[in-house]
Image (spheres, rainbow, N blue to C red):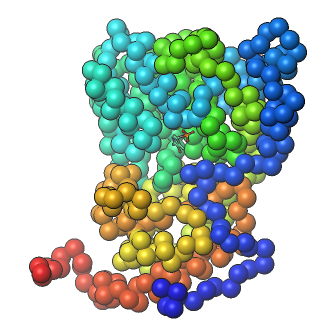
Amino acid sequence: MSTVLSEPKLPAGVKLPIYMDNHATTPLDPRVLETMLPFFTNKFGNAASRNHSFGWEAEKAVDLAREQIAKLIGATAKEIIFTSGATESNNLAIKGIGEMYRERGNHIITQVTEHKAVLDTCKRMEKLGYRVTYLPVNADGLIEMDDLKRAIDDKTILVTIMFANNEIGVIQPIEEIGKLCHERGILFHTDAVQAVGKIPVDVNAMNIDVLSLSGHKIYGPKGVGALYVRRRNPRVQIAAQMDGGGHERGMRSGTLNVPGIVGLGMACEIARLEMAEEAAKLIAMRDRLRKKLESNLDFIHLNGSMEHHLPGNLNMSFIHVEGESLLMGINDIAVSSGSACTSATLEPSYVLKALGLGDDVAHSSIRFGLGRFNTPAEVDYVADKVIDVVQKLRELSPLYEMAKEGIDLTKVQWQAH
Ligand SMILES: *Cc1c(COP(=O)(O)O)cnc(C)c1O
């Protein structure tokens, strides 16, 4: 490969490898680390210790973090329950509501492009005797409100629909979903991991009853997250899935991860203050990347509605290029691909398949996840590199030559051998 591919010149200030996978995780903001450090050393108290200043100091820090998180999503501090991350938050929301409202009904509605932390939890609920409806998405990745309306019946207790998708960046019609759920007296949970801190989220304006968020997707630490649980109109009840000392209003026992919580709070505070400016910067870089790729390459396909889209996401398929070769060719850039190259099955992404994409288009897709610490110079390097590699790979591809000549590859009768 290296004999075929030439190296674009490294612009000033660009260091390799370049991290452009900010939907998978984000680097810790140095300001967040700074805030956390004392809580690993002299401020080590247990926030549940009521008898001395070590405990009070930790509790005060946790309370501040609760305020900071609540403020970012328009909630009140008492409505924030700390967890180990959004996987746990999603589990607690779905299992906890399912258990608590079992007498009212056993039907849950979700949709097909949810994160596995929601889909696999819903599968578990089916094993426990719940009915789950998995709504389809249209070619843009959005659910249809009519499908949701039709799916609701008198046994529906919960609708769980993600705010923004982690692969294709598509933002669901959360406000409309929340309004419908409240009209029908159904609880609404949203996995808002990719939305919180990136775009405005307001649990009251959007009628959200329960919301999951995670520290490490917003420049905070790993292993800490939160669940927002509405306290009035309606007061949501959640059956604990972790029993013990009765922490977090009895919903989630376990000694609080004080340094992590302090970091999550600070991450939310920074996001609240800088979100608008940061989003504008990310959109500009995202559009620059998109324009460069579009003006230099043919047979490319944008995945997911660009109208309802996260600022830092660009998901693009490079048709007639083999996904694995493309990833290998750009191995100095950290991105994700639509082909699950880690799995033995080589199944393409279920999210891309849900949009109706063929396996070949899904396999050749790249998710660019731009974040706080990316620069325009990095964007230029990434664009040049991808263009170079795609062009070189296509020079070797008979399929690309045929497509360019206007041959419809889906109609070709391939000879069996
Ligand atoms: C990352 C992610 C999760 C899981 O969050 P963790 O805190 O890593 O458990 C859940 N949902 C979405 C949409 C995510 O992007």
User: Where residue 338 sits in the image (x, y, percent)?
Assistant: 42, 61
The number of discs equals 0
User: Where residue 38 sits in the image (x, y, percent)?
Assistant: 85, 35
Image position of 282 with respect to 198: above or below: below
Judge from the rendering whether residue 232 lies leftward or rightward of residue 278; answer left or right: left
Image position of 33 with respect to 346: above or below: above
x 72%, y 48%: residue: 28
Instruction: Please indicate, yes or no, whether residue 101 appears anywhere in the rendered image.
Output: yes
User: Where residue 79 sits in the image (x, y, percent)?
Assistant: 64, 19
Judge from the rendering whether residue 391 lies leftward or rightward of residue 322; answer left or right: right
Judge from the rendering whether residue 168 lies leftward or rightward of residue 36; answer left or right: left
Q: Nearer the viewer, residue 415 or 223?
A: 223
Image position of 191 with respect to 152: above or below: below
Instruction: Please indicate, yes or no, whether residue 197 appears anywhere in the rendered image.
Output: no
Quadrant showing the C terminus:
bottom left
x 40%, y 62%: residue: 341
x 41%, y 27%: residue: 159
Residue found at the very far left of the displayed protein = 416
